[in-house]
């Protein structure tokens, strides 16, 4: 069965694709992956702070999700369920690597000072300036404490609601609000303005990296079905 083509009037939902997958059709899973790749990558990277590790975590999450798809009771909750799998895979890798870094006050002050001395907004129309802004933002997001970083990535970058963020990270909504507030304080008011100017397009995930994950997962899935 081929993957259905979505239209603006009749979009193909995750639930519909999952129904097709559960009846034995694998092609719709590629569409599932391409829909969720960026969010899962950003979530995994917010925990691991390493592109390659995050990609590996996302790939394993897709394999796990595919094998456990029959256990999902509510297909409409698929997005949050999938994100939790990716989060748990990333956390497992993080614990294994035992790499935990936080940003102290002096480091934050140094970053702000360096930024003020080399303000990329002097060249607002320059691609290089935009890249400098994004690099500054990404570097400072990476330096957030672990528990704040994932909340910030989901709320500010992926635009998840408080409820959805709480479901994905399996924490209370009040905790989401507190951690998000503290993360924004750490990033400072000036950095928040630059995040908006950069279009919140940090840790973009498309093109070759997206294709690579899809290809690797499909190969692993093929091997599983043949064994």
Image (cartoon, helix red, strand yellow):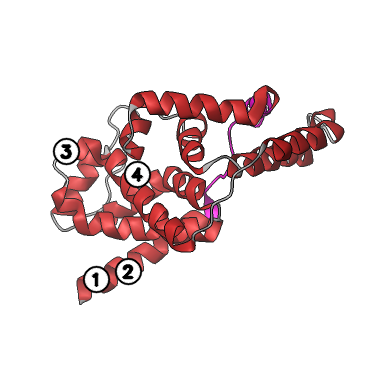
Disc 2 element: helix
* Cα–Cα span, label 4 and label 1: 22 Å
Q: Which residue is mark 1?
A: 224
Horizontal relation, residue 50 to residue 211: left or right = right
Task: Please tell me whether mark 2 or mark 4 is closer to you in this view.
Answer: 4
* Cα–Cα span, label 4 and label 3: 15 Å
Q: Nearer the viewer, residue 44 or 40?
A: 44
Residue 227, image x, y percentages: 20, 77
* Upstream in sequence: badge 4 or badge 1: 4
Q: Nearer the viewer, residue 48 or 211?
A: 48
Q: Is residue 93 magenta-colored?
A: no
Residue at (46%, 39%) from the top-left corner?
A: 147
Marks 2,3: beta carbons within 8 A:
no
Q: Which residue is mark 4?
A: 83
Residue 157 in view, yes or no? yes
Task: Please tell me whether mark 4 or mark 3 is closer to you in this view.
Answer: 4
Residue 130 in view, yes or no? no
Marks 2,1: beta carbons within 8 A:
yes
Residue at (82%, 31%) from the top-left corner?
A: 116
Horizontal relation, residue 211 to residue 77: left or right = right
* Circle number at residue 220: 2
Location of the N terminus by quadrant is bottom left
Residue 118, image x, y percentages: 85, 36
Marks 4,3: beta carbons within 8 A:
no
Circle 4 packing at 10 Å, graded few (<14), some (14-19), many (20+), is many
Circle 3 packing at 10 Å, graded few (<14), some (14-19), many (20+), is few
Q: Which residue is mark 3?
A: 74
Number of disc labels: 4
Residue 50, image x, y percentages: 55, 56
Stretch of the chain drawn in magenta: 191-207
For residue 212, above or below residue 76: below
Circle 1 packing at 10 Å, graded few (<14), some (14-19), many (20+), is few
């Amino acid at each position: 069965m081929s993957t259905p083509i979505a239209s603006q009037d009749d979009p193909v939902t995750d639930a519909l694709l999952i129904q097709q997958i559960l009846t034995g059709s694998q092609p719709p899973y590629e569409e599932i992956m391409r829909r969720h790749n960026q969010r899962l990558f950003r979530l995994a990277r917010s925990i691991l702070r390493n592109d390659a590790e995050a990609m590996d975590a996302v790939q394993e999450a897709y394999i796990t999700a595919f094998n456990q798809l029959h256990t999902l009771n509510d297909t409409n909750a698929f997005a949050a369920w999938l994100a939790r799998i990716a989060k748990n895979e990333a956390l497992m890798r993080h614990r294994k690597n035992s790499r935990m870094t936080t940003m102290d006050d002096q480091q934050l002050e140094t970053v702000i000072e360096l930024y003020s001395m080399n303000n990329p907004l002097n060249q607002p129309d320059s691609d290089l300036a935009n890249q400098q802004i994004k690099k500054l933002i990404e570097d400072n997001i990476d330096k957030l404490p672990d528990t704040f970083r994932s909340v910030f990535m989901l709320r500010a970058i992926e635009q998840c609601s408080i409820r959805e963020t709480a479901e994905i990270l399996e924490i209370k909504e009040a905790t989401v609000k507190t951690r998000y507030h503290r993360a924004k304080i750490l990033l400072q008011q000036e950095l928040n303005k630059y995040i908006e100017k950069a279009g919140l397009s940090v840790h973009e995930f498309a093109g070759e990296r997206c294709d690579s994950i899809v290809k690797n997962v499909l190969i692993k899935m093929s091997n599983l079905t043949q064994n």
